[in-house]
Amino acid sequence: MEEMVTVYLLGKKYSVPAALTIMDAMEYAGFKLIRGCGCRSGFCGACAVIYRIKGTTDLKVVLSCQTKVEEGMCVGKIDSFPINKRTFNIEEIKADDNIVGQLYPEIYSCIGCNACTKGCPQGLNVMQYIAFAQRGAYEKAAHASFDCVGCNICASRCPAQISHAAVGLLCRRLTGKYIAPKCEHLAKRVAEIENGDYVTLLKKLKNMPLEEIKELYNKREIEK
Amino acid sequence: MSAFTEDMLKSMAKVEATRAQRLNAAIERFSAEEKDALLQEFHPDYSAKGFKVLEVGPNKGDKVPVELAHLLEGQSRLEGVELDLDNIDYDVDVLVIGGGGAGASAALEAHKGGAKVLVVTKLRMGDANTMMAEGGIQAADKGNDSPATHYLDAFGGGHYKNIPELLEKLVTQGPLAIDWLSKLGVMFDKETDGTMVTTHGGGTSRKRMHACADYTGAEIMRVLRDEVVNCGISVVEFSPAIELLLDAEGKCAGAVLLDYDSNEYKVVRAKTVIIATGGAGRLHYQGFPTSNHYGATADGLVMAYRAGAPLIYADAIQYHPTGVAYPAQIYGALVTEKVRSLGAQLVNSEGEIFMHPLETRDVAAASIIRECTTRHKGVKALDGVALWLDTPLIEMLHGEGTIAKRLPGMLRMYAKFGIDLRKEPILVYPTLHYQNGGILIDEDAHTKIAGLYVAGEAVGGIHGTNRLMGNSLLDIIVFGRIAGAKAAEAAKATTLGKLSLEHVKAFAAAEKAAGVSGELSPKLLPVYTHGRKAR
């Protein structure tokens, strides 16, 4: 007999197999998910839920596709959280002038409560990357926030009303575009292609008889 | 307490016992003849019972997976619905259906081309297979590589079935795509001097796999989505398109949406339409689990087919060799090919290596299935059998800390369920991963229907009958951008006639005449009950 647990999904009591994730338990219970379900692999941040074990004080916020059900779990959903993303022209902004602080001045309202970090299902040190952003260390903020899936659980817990995921994303875009070293071999290849350097070679391959190209493929040298 | 069962641990001990001797062993690749024989005997695409011959539509006489056939030859959600098509909810130049990487790239280029753009998507913007693409994106941008070498790798890997003109676009625009993404701020893995960190993928002859740790697709998707917002492009979420609209001349002229919140229909009139609806993993062909997104149900193929657009290679499905076979909570999820790129070997229950880790996906999947079936060297896992992917090899080869740095997503996914892949190997089995075929397009991403464009996984022909790792993140960018630019340009010269759903009625009449009937389609979302019997 399969081990079962009792859970309360959006306030309703169900008995579900103990091996299921919260998301699967909702489907087992008969919910047809539209909101709050995405990649089902922990990469998209669509499925944040909030729960407490019945009778306890602690609230926990997790991704429902990555968390197993437990006895007495009372689960509510965070399908859509209104973050405050500022728009910008990536070509016009620069990675200095305190651009992140200008676009997101609320990062300076951080009171250091660390609720963001405690809530992060990815285990990121969210408060730390906000601190990096505060002092203009965008590359550090970029790396520290890199594994963010944008579930916005941090934002839902923040007394300073910061939109952490948006801050991290801006730091990463600044890093990718402006701070990371430029790639010379890429620039060279782009120039060659724009100059039409490979047109003849590709034309030859496109028109090569099948047996000839098979031979070429099967005998091609493979980089170690 | 170990997360593995006792029987698994017994087999794991054999894997550990042979690890040192396997570490630097030279492993032969299969010959062309061996590969052909393996595929014939063990690849699911060669199983006759998984397919049905279509009886109506532009591909009448062709075989496609049974589950797809039931939808292509299905019943329109608008059958019997009286819709006033003069009552237009959204009137735009370019309609993009789908909010993944291809849709976002198309929307950005169409916007740049001066078009009024609307993106509609079934779930949220960015809820797509792009977000889940872990391993990397190919592009021939290094000194020892060239677009021609990339062409040859993809053409051979695709069994020489790739449409040459499409493949040429893919490989020549590859470096341009990386450049475009870099300039938008995508953080590729680089050396301190700016050199791209690149690895092999199955079937590549040069190390041209660019990556953003193992969040490559997620990193690309979140940047593109952010840019769509920055550009002020209109996005309507939770509103899947359920039929295309044509005008009196047969030009594509918009779509009918189903608003998931109100359950009402919405009419979009658009001068040109781009389908970017992605793949079909959630149709679970032949009962396979899938690594795909919740919304991957081939909706675009169904709508385009009903409107008269032919498909190509719709019978060629990619089973990713390494899906999670254990534990149950992440069953079917993707274990990125980058794990093998970094040196992890596939090993059977006896601790023996049975193939080169970097064979192409179809050959690797067939080889795993052979090991688990006729050779009886699988490990029992959940309801089936599986093989080991020997991940601790990675740190023996590249040093401690490599997994945390290069595969943080994989490390985290397993850690949540009590498995440390730095220390223990993991159990894998092929999972339904990619639709190699799709809607036929030309070099401009244009279909046989005037005004209808396609980009991304919904396209067929670019990859022949087997796509190489890293070529789909590339194709969504390359063909997404082409589709967006061309659709915006074409919209300028387009005047639409009266909107019509006559093609849907005509298709239903053809089905009736042929005596076929299928399911309500497009399917939109799968239904799961996890073993509970639903009434």
Image (tube, coloured by chain):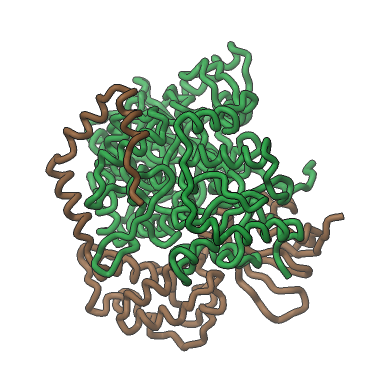
Chain colours: A brown, B green
Q: Residue at the spot x=83%, y=60% of the render?
A: A3
Relative vertical location of residue A172 with respect to residue B49 in this rendering, above or below: below
Q: Residue furthest right?
A: A1
Pinpoint residue B88: horizontal percent, then vertical percent: 41, 37
In depth, the one of A60 and B130 nearer the eye is: B130
Pinpoint residue B264: horizontal percent, then vertical percent: 55, 41
Relative vertical location of residue B84 with respect to residue B171 in this rendering, above or below: above
Pinpoint residue B25: horizontal percent, then vertical percent: 49, 53
Residue B294 seen in the current view? no
Quadrant housing the C terminus of chain B: top right
Pinpoint residue B461: horizontal percent, then vertical percent: 39, 30
In depth, the one of B533 and B166 nearer the eye is: B166
Decide if residue B286 is on the left or right side of residue B94: right
Q: Residue at the spot x=27%, y=75% of the render?
A: A99
In depth, the one of B54 and B153 nearer the eye is: B153
Decide if residue B71 is on the left or right side of residue A128: right
Q: Residue at the spot x=38%, y=67% of the render?
A: A169
Residue B372 seen in the current view? yes
| Residue B481 lies in quadrant | top left
In depth, the one of B105 and B145 nearer the eye is: B145
Quadrant housing the N terminus of chain B: bottom right
| Residue A23 lies in quadrant | bottom right
Decide if residue B496 is on the left or right side of residue B407: left
Relative vertical location of residue B497 with respect to residue B157 in this rendering, above or below: above
Relative vertical location of residue A25 with respect to residue B527 in this rendering, above or below: below
